[in-house]
Structure formats: structure tokens, C-alpha cells
Amino acid sequence: MADRRTRLTRATQAGLAWDQQHHAVVPPIYLSTTYAWPKPGESPGHEYSRSSNPTRSLLAETIADLESGAGAEITASGMAALTTLVAAFVPAGALVAIPHDCYGGTWRLFSSLARKEQFEVAYVDFTDPAATAAVLARKPALVLLESPSNPLLRITDLPNVIDAAHGVGATVAVDNTFLSPALQRPIELGADIVIHSTTKFLNGHSDVVGGAVVGATAEIVQELRWWANCLGTPGGALDSYLTLRGIRTLGVRMKAHCDNAQALAELLAQHPAVRATHYPGLSDDPGHDLARQQQDGFGGMLSFELNDLAAAKRCLSGAHLLLPRRIARRRRKPHLPPREHDPRGHAARGSSRCRNLRRHAPHRGRHRDHRRPRRRPARRSRQGAQVVDRSGGGTRLASLVHRSERFTERCDPGLLVGADQPDAPGEGVGA
Ligand SMILES: Cc1ncc(COP(=O)(O)O)c(C=O)c1O
């Protein structure tokens, strides 16, 4: 019978009932580094966990299925995925084209290796057809795309740029970290390879640093896996297990991320202190129409610019969480019905369960008694933004502003002071 499940449903069920020995419903974690051969010369399929591991293979198959790829290798980080890509697909002395506004770590990797004269790198605005044509005329061996880009959320016309790059013989890889396969599948748009930092949306719980490289064909997958084994970049079994568990909720999480980012972007776009908001979900964003065509959602990341560094620092130190007013109002609403009518059977206000909740989780709006004075009153801006200093969900402004700083620093050193981001060997270690 044909499998009529959607790819996201298949991901929620990946590996369930896979254990033939004990029939565990949730797949076990294989931590063993080595696997015994029944007889000399008869491999059981896995031999040594750097080369392959059952838990990692299960995650690789799941991500490959989500991305419409022929297969994948799981790596120890997104940077390990990019390192594997470079080793496998960039011949010595070749030209590599990468986005001019790519993730800072990607920029650091490629620029550092180029400084060591391993290859030449061109930083390209792939949203500009003339700049794209000019670099393709130089016949790069590898074109790396990031759409949306980090941090400016620029959208590249993937089918057209990929097609043109193939026309000059380039291998095309797309970093799909920002959207995840729930919202975009670059291989379906023509890409040869997809890169992921699974640290972000795929795992989704901030407890694993991981990555993945997905190939469109069996030959590409074989090449990537060979180099991953050679370099020692593959990820661990426990991380693979956690990432697989995270992926089971990818579909619902991405919907919530899109809703949150859209609400925040609309708020920021009309805020007087914000110079520019970058989010393809805004109807006047330059990438809006393209994103509608090639994506299944606008994504959970946005960035915005303030007038100067001092404003960015004030914003960073003052806000941990920014809630549009309508979300904040919904959260503040007391959810508990009066004591005498409690059809849902919840603990009534004043009950011991409710008092315990207040003591142990005073931040949880759901259980907060609305008559009780708030510990720290929230400050509210004129535009309806509510700046609160508690954690607990939402889009993280701190890292967004931090990333924009890095980018601005790279592109326009005159604008920002403080080179506290180590970007060259010998300058220390930074993300
Ligand atoms: C788009 C993108 N690619 C790659 C990476 C690197 O991933 P990792 O931190 O897992 O090494 C990041 C990290 O933020 C990223 O945002």
C-alpha cells in the first residue's frame, strides 16, 4: 500500500518500532563505538561509530527524507557540515562563491581557508543578477547559497541561480538552517547539497550542537560520507537521538515560530526607534514575493537595525523578551475560572496546588492570580511593545542584534567599535 503520510508525519514516526530485539517503541541509542563481526569479513553493517552508527543513520535517513535527498551524513555541528562540504567539493586553487551576508562562522571558515591559499573565495550578493552573472562567468567549482541569509534575511531566487550555476559546471549547496525542510526543500528546487546546523530549528531545544549534509544523489552522498569519515566530522549517537526526538515536533514548532516572527516583525517595522526590519513575511520586504513562491512559510528568524551601537546595546541590556501587545494581553489573562465554577477541574485560586505554583513558578501567567501585584511591572513603549525581563519562549532579540553587529562590523568597520568578535586564527574562540 502506498505511504500516504506527509513528510512531516513520517518524521514524527521515524524509527518507531524499529527495535527488533526488545520491541521498544522509541528507538534505542547505540553508544557503542565498535560492532562485532559474526565472522571475519562479514560486516554487520556498522563497524566503528565514526564511520557509521545505527542511531546516527536513523537521523540521517529522517533528514534525507524530509529534504527529498538520496541520503545524508550527520555531523558534529553546522560548521562540521560546511567543513565536510569544502573538503569534498572544492579542489585546490578553485573558486568558491559564497553569499556576502552569510552566517559569520561560514564567512570565517571560507575566508580563513582562502587566506591559507587553499582556494579563492568570492563574496557575492546573489539577489543581484548582475553580480551573480559576473561571478558565474569565472566558473566557480562550488556555489554556496543561504536563503534566507543570516542575518539580513535576503531571499535568493534559488531555482534560477542554481540553474545558472549548473550551467557553468558548479556544484550548488544551500544552507537551509533558517527555514528547515518544513518550510523549504532546496533539492526540490535543483540544489545538489543541503547544509544544516541542526543546532537550530531541527533539534529545536537548545541542547545539541549538530549539523547535517544532505546529498541529492547517491554519488554525492557517498562523497560526503567518505570525507566526513576521513575528517572525523560525524556527530555522536546521543546527539542524534536528541535531534531525532526534536524533529518529531518540527512541523508544529515551525508554525509557531512563523506566527511569532510575523507578529514581531510587524511590531518592529512600525516602531520609531527601528531603522530597518528584515523579514520576508513583511509585504514590502524585497524578498517577499520570492519567498512566497519558493517557501512554505516565512520562517522564525528576523533581524532589525537600530540607529547606532549605543541604541543596540541599550536594547540588548534592557530586553530579554519582546512581546507584541496582543500576545502579552493574551498571556496576562487569568485562565482560572472562579472557584465555584471549575468545569475543567483545575486547581482553584487559593488552593494549595495553586499556591505552590505561585511559589515555584511565579512567571507562569497561566497560574498567576490576577489580583496579586506583579513583582516587576512591565514597561510598555508607545508602540505597544512590552519589554519584559523574564525568559520563557519567543524570539531572542539578543542573539539577533548580536549577529547584526557582527555583520555590520565586517562590512563597515567604521560604523562599530569594539572588535570583540574573534574572526581570525590567534584571536581566541568565538561562535
Ligand atoms: C545559517 C547557519 N549556518 C551554519 C551555522 C553553524 O552551525 P553550528 O553553530 O551548529 O556550527 C549557523 C550557526 O548559527 C547558521 O546560522
Image (spheres, grey):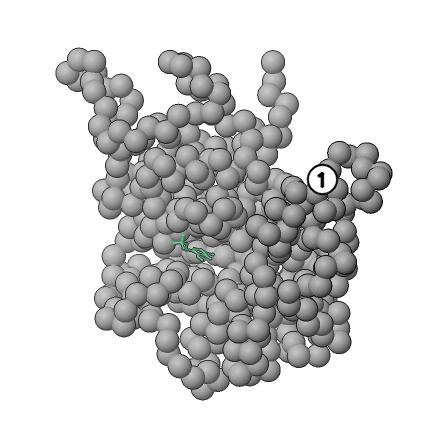
| Residue 163 visible in this rendered orientation of the protein | no
Is 274 situated left or right of 200 in this image?
A: right
Closer-to-camera residue (219/275): 275
Residue 262 figure quarter: bottom right
Q: Residue at x 60, y 13 (%)?
A: 1
| Residue 91 visible in this rendered orientation of the protein | yes
Is 161 situated left or right of 322 in this image?
A: left
Residue 334 position in % (x across, y down): 76, 51
Closer-to-camera residue (342/251): 342
- Tag 1 residue: 347
Q: Residue at x 55, y 43 (%)?
A: 181
Residue 210 position in % (x across, y down): 39, 46
Q: Amino acid at mark 1?
A: Ala
Kindly state the secondary structure of the residue where label 1 is placed.
loop
For label 1, the crowd category at 10 Å Cα-Cα, with few meaning under 14, some 14 to 19 and many 20 or more, is some
Q: Which image quarter has ligand 1?
A: bottom left
Q: Residue at x 60, y 30 (%)?
A: 9
Judge whether 201 appears above or below 246 on screen: below
Closer-to-camera residue (431/351): 351
Q: Determine the residue located farthest toward the bottom in the rendered image.
A: 414
Q: Determine the residue located farthest toward the left in the rendered image.
A: 40
